Amino acid sequence: MQDKLIGREQEKAILLKALQSKRAEMVSIIGRRRIGKTFLVQTTYKDHIAFEMTGIQNAPRTEQLQNFAIQLTKYSKSTFPLTIPQNWLSAFYLLSEFLEPKQQNKRVVVFLDELPWAATPKSGFLRGLSWFWNSWATHKNMVVVICGSAASWMIQKVVNHTGGLHNRITRRIHLNPFTLSETEQYLKVNNKVKLNRYHILQLYMAMGGIPHYLKEVEAGKSAIQNIEDICFSETGLLRDEFSNLYTALFEHADNHIAIIRALAQKRQGMNRTELIKTAKLPNGGSVTKALTELQQSGFIDIFYPYGNKKNNKLFRLMDEYSIFYLQFIENNTKELNNLWKQLSQTQPYKIWCGYAFENICLRHIPQIKKALSIGGVYSVSSTFSKKGKGKEKGTQIDLLLDRNDQVINIFEIKHYNKEFTISKSYAENLRNKRHIFEETTKTRKHLFLTMITTFGMIENEHSLGLIDQTLTMNDLFEGG
């Protein structure tokens, strides 16, 4: 039984508009590996795809052309002989000949998946695609969909193409991981999983909202049991996914992996100087390229300090699986019974929970704004830190919302396995945090101290008059 398409409402609408259009359309879809790009296209366009080809990873041009010929023979139902074209111009000419009679009767779709793998260096693939679009397809009743997991390659080589494909993309889709709400729906509908939200949160913290990873979650097992099977067992999908993840997306992925490993060491993120030193990389264009590619693919994100001081921007690792792998899987490859259950009782587990929960909150800013009833208020998210000097205390704030209605939310994010209680010392720390921010920034805006916890907060004499608003993980599960 085929999975049902969960979420993706905006993306599906874009594809349907392209299908209903009266002109030829070229749609680019970008999204990291395992995100569900292929499934989105095949499900939405299932009755309209006249030709589909997926590039082969690390294959030379000859094999890519052979792959094309095999697919053309398949879709033509042997009306075309299995002849391998000599080059991509000839290949796309054959495709146009095959499609000519089809597009006259109904609107057809050509789906070219994993384009970066097919368009090998000096292969002439993009020139052939340019000819196909400019000389033939642009005048026909059709949609051409091009997909790629290597987001930066897609943006540089196709979306921002300076040759024959320049400004030819008519619609763009950037496919993101599932939100918590979509993850909950996916597990319920496709996996028949009936777990409460705390268990779903634990799964999300370990593997993120990646559909292909979530597909492994089994009904009748707890989050701990599923993580044990998927991440630590010898046959688990995610036990060695890290070794394939970056090399499948980026050429010369050593720099990318070094950056990921460096950022995993500091939860608040690093500036460029600190990152280069930690990763032991030369300061130059290769690092800039790797950082850009990692950001465009969604593995890292950039956070600006309050006041938008761009020179002090921080790079932060956001990929849940990479964080989890480097923290727990990489150094725990021995087959041990209930390994994750044992690890989940340790102090490193508690530290990781805090880091992972913070990242999830940063991913769900629209949901947080909705819960605060400020969805329509323009706001800018940022961070704040001040180092202590002598007797002067420092502080760190991982999330601020600077709002246009003259308010700033200072967020305190706390992962806890039950309702959280603020102690006298914790309350004093929060007061100092708010005071240091107010004194340092000289802001005239009103400050709201806002708690985000898993199960909420027990009000007591230390929280009254201090905490203005309290959100729980349930708020993160609401649609943004």
Image (cartoon, grey):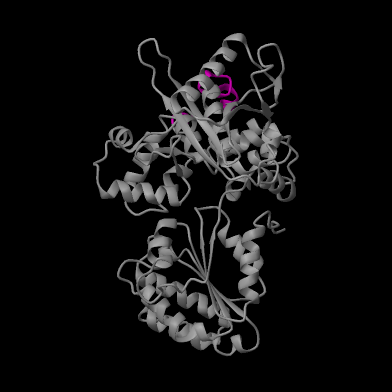
Q: Using the image, determine if residue 320 lies above or below residue 59.
A: above
Residue 247 point in image, percent of width and height: 39, 50
Residue 477 point in image, percent of width and height: 69, 40
User: Which of 320/117 is in front?
Assistant: 320
User: Which of 324/171 is in front?
Assistant: 171
Which image quadrant for residue 193? top right
Residue 55 point in image, percent of width and height: 45, 66
Q: Which quarter shows the N terminus?
A: bottom right
Characterize the magenta stretch by its predominant secondary structure. Answer: loop
Does residue 366 belong to the magenta stretch?
no
User: Which of 393/333 is in front?
Assistant: 393
In the rendered image, the residue lying farthest to the front is: 444
Which image quadrant for residue 2? bottom right
Q: Residue at x 49, y 41 (%)?
A: 319
Span of residues in magenta: 331-348
Q: Using the image, determine if residue 406 lies above or below residue 291.
A: above
Left or right: where does residue 333 sit relative to residue 261?
A: right
